[in-house]
Image (spheres, rainbow, N blue to C red):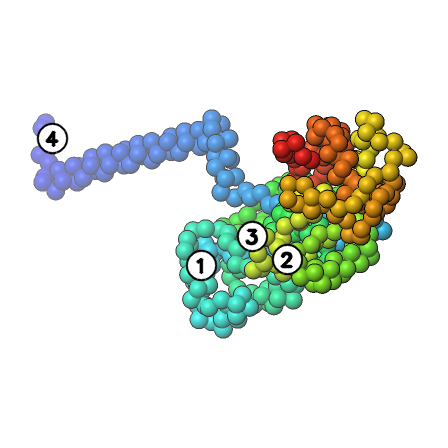
Amino acid sequence: MKAAPKTPKAKRQEEQANFISWRFALLCGCILLALAFLLGRVAWLQVISPDMLVRQGDMRSLRVQEVSTARGMITDRSGRPLAVSVPVKAIWADPKELHDAGGVTLDTRWKALADALNMPLDQLATRINTNPRMRFIYLARQVNPDMADYIKKLKLPGIHLREESRRYYPSGEVTAHLIGFTNVDSQGIEGVEKSFDKWLTGQPGERIVRKDRYGRVIEDISSTDSQAAHNLALSIDERLQALVYRELNNAVAFNKAESGSAVLVDVNTGEVLAMANSPSYNPNNFAGTAKDTMRNRAITDVFEPGSTVKPMVVMTALQRGIVNENTVLNTVPYRINGHEIKDVARYSELTLTGVLQKSSNVGVSKLALAMPSSALVDTYSRFGLERRPIWGWSENAVAYILKNNGGLT
């Protein structure tokens, strides 16, 4: 018996059921395929290449912070401070954080910050908005603690404080050329500060932290302790230094000189007890000071040694047998090549002892002219006049001797 023919309605229902079944199978296949892809991706990320992802994550979140150490103190021979570091603050901004929070506005707090930094509000906004993706920019350095606390209380987004130090010189201009000064980053620029910079600096530590997207520290990863800086004790006596500086200023003013230098040395030990220059400057505020004024003329300038070499001339004459300890010299003034050679006071004759006691130009010049110039050059060289001093200064000049001066010395 034949089956009854399907009605159009039955056919439509059967076709619809087949379509639903096929669509369901396709959907299940897509889901399984997506699941397989996800599982494969998870396996790839977790098993095959996890280190790469960790590195990428660390690059985005890990930050290295320097743990600074205070610069060493400089003292005189008795421990009196000549250079110390005082704690101050640096004001810095995170332009990205600030931009995300709405940027610089006309709010009274922003105006207060601009006033504290002594700059117009529009200039402050321009400085911060120059590169809105940056994460660090200095707004002010070496701000005193009171001003830093005031800025902190403003609670402005993206504005932060950072600890640093500023150098202070208690003796001011009295020891300016000797001690020198540092720059805003506490690096020695002149004087002892420059010559012994490594000794005074120490080794900063390091702190590795993890930060969130807002720049807040959420985890301490590791840290390396800083190595303390060394203090430096000089042979200088601060009281003698002040005395020498005062008398030098008086002498420069009295003689209407452009400048003057004075060095006080302990002849028994060779220690430098004082070293001063005039004119001087204030190392605590040297803005606008001419660089020439900052020069330590006592060690950077080359000048004729004058009477300090007279004993060397007498010694050489004795060694070569030109004179003996009983020799008496004619010390009446005379002329050579048109120049008069004379002493401060007139002496008709002097013994060798008298020549040294009176610092006689006439007597010493006659001894020098009685010898070949090479003899004196050899003596000067053996006394180290052509060698660089070994006291550790980086700025000191090196002496030179004129070895061909028309037969004269």
**Residue corresponding to mark 3:** 216
- Helix, strand or loop under label 2: loop
User: Which quarter shows the N terminus?
Assistant: top left
Of pointers 3 and 1, the one earlier in the residue sequence: 1
Q: Kindly report the distance in space between the C-alpha atoms of the residues bearing marks 1 and 2.
A: 44 Å
Q: Kindly report the distance in space between the C-alpha atoms of the residues bearing marks 4 and 3.
A: 80 Å
Nearer the viewer's eye, disc 3 or disc 1?
1
Residue drawn at the location 42% of the way across and 61% of the way down:
126
**Residue corresponding to mark 2:** 258
Please name the amino acid that badge 1 sits on: Arg
Quadrant in the rendering for residue 392: top right
- Pointer 2 with pointer 3, Cβ within 8 A: no
- Pointer 4 with pointer 1, Cβ within 8 A: no
Image coordinates of residue 384 in percent, x first then y, are 74, 32
Q: Kindly report the distance in space between the C-alpha atoms of the residues bearing marks 2 and 3.
A: 58 Å
Label of residue 3 in the image: 4
Q: Kindly report the distance in space between the C-alpha atoms of the residues bearing marks 3 and 1.
A: 23 Å
Residue drawn at the location 69% of the way across and 44% of the way down:
335
